[in-house]
Amino acid sequence: MEMILIFGLASFRLTRLIVFDKITEWLRSPFFEELIEEGEIYLVPQKSGVRRWIGELLSCYWCTGIWTSAILLAVYVFIPAFGLPVILGLAIAAVGSIIESFITKGLGD
């Protein structure tokens, strides 16, 4: 049962890292176009091809979450010596980010 929690936290963190975090913006940028309307910038998936498919995937948190879960599970099964430390690291980072969210909301920042 604890492995489900660890995998869930790891998948949560990896998904947020891919979909939202600034540090992976370079990874997302080839798959989106910037659309500026009324002073707001919107990211829209590319118009066609594989870039559009990946852009659609990256704009869907739930879709990316399924793929990250599958990838983490595959790495754990086929390369456990590499996969387990990565999964544990992501799970620990997820707990840290959840705690940070609570602290930030509590302090009103």
Image (cartoon, grey):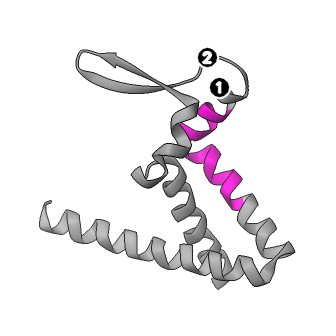
- The residue positioned 77% from the left and 75% from the top of the image is 76
* Location of the C terminus (image quadrant): bottom left
Q: Which secondary structure, mark 1?
A: helix
* Location of the N terminus (image quadrant): bottom right
Within-10-Å neighbours for mark 1: few <14, some 14–19, many 20+: some
Query: Which quarter of the picture shows residue 90?
Result: bottom right
Q: Main secondary structure of the magenta part?
A: helix
Q: Which residue matches tag 1? A: 52
Q: Is residue 36 magenta?
A: no
- The residue positioned 65% from the left and 82% from the top of the image is 85
**Whole-percent x and y of residue 20?**
44, 48
Q: Is residue 35 above or below residue 15?
A: above
User: Mark 2 and 1 residues: CB-CB less than 8 Å, in contact?
Assistant: yes
Question: As rendered, which of 101 and 35 lies closer to the eye?
Answer: 35
One can see residue 99 in this view: yes
- The residue positioned 58% from the left and 22% from the top of the image is 46
Instruction: Please state the extent of the stretch shown in magenta in the rendering.
Output: 54-69
Q: Earlier in the sequence, mark 2 or mark 1?
A: 2
- The residue positioned 33% from the left and 74% from the top of the image is 99
Q: Which residue matches tag 2? A: 47
Query: Which quarter of the picture shows residue 14?
Result: bottom right
Q: Give the residue type at disc 1.
A: Arg
